[in-house]
């Protein structure tokens, strides 16, 4: 199976790899696993005044999972958390031209950003 150019680009030059300090109040951390293959993705955001000002990820997984998380960290920077909640895996899959067997890799990225936002909101006492 051939990877699309965009997947290869993000895989070879992943954006925003790294970690934020998860003990910080402004940081939300999401860690999710893909039941289909056992891959794991950690995605973190820094939020100031409801806007995501930074995002980092570490992904132990396939090229599509790495590309999906790299893309999502690029997308969410500068977004309001309410808008970042709306990101759909189908948008990621479309942008990266993922084939059907790799759709779950983009689901992982959607789950990871949602989990990071939920963690941030929990720290700040928001009820859902
Ligand atoms: Fe896990 Fe893709 S199946 S690396
Ligand atoms: Fe499992 Fe990509 S995350 S194959």
Image: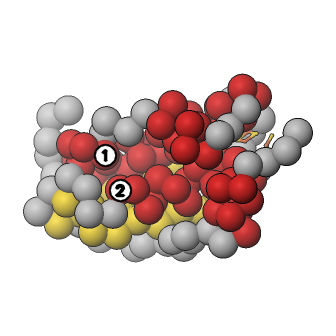
Residue at the extreme right: 1
Instruction: Name the quarter showing ligand 1.
Output: top right
Quadrant location, the C terminus: top left
Residue 80, x across and y down, in percent: 20, 52
- What residue would you read off at disc 2? 76
Quadrant location, the N terminus: top right
Residue at the extreme left: 49
Mark 1 and mark 2 residues within 8 Å of each other at the beta carbon: yes
- What residue would you read off at disc 1? 84
Instruction: Give the numbered dot on residue 16.
Output: none
Residue 56, x across and y down, in percent: 47, 66
Q: Which residue sits at x=73%, y=49%? A: 4
Q: Which residue sits at x=47%, y=37%? A: 91
Q: How is the image coloured?
A: secondary structure
Q: Secondary structure at mark 1?
A: helix
One can see residue 29 in this view: no
Residue 64, x across and y down, in percent: 70, 47
Please name whichever residue, 90 or 66, is drawn nearer the observer in this view of the structure.
Answer: 90
């Amino acid at each position: 199976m051939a990877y699309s150019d965009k997947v290869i680009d993000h895989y070879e030059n992943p954006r925003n790899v790294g970690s934020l300090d998860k003990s910080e109040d402004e940081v939300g951390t999401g860690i999710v696993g893909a039941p289909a293959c056992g891959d794991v993705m950690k995605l973190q955001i820094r939020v100031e005044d409801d806007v995501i000002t930074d995002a980092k990820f570490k992904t132990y997984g396939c090229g599509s999972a790495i590309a999906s998380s790299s893309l999502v960290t690029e997308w969410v920077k500068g977004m309001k958390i309410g808008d970042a909640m709306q990101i759909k895996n189908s948008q990621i899959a479309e942008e990266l031209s993922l084939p059907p067997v790799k759709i779950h890799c983009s689901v992982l990225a959607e789950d990871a950003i949602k989990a990071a936002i939920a963690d941030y909101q929990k720290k700040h006492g928001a009820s859902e």
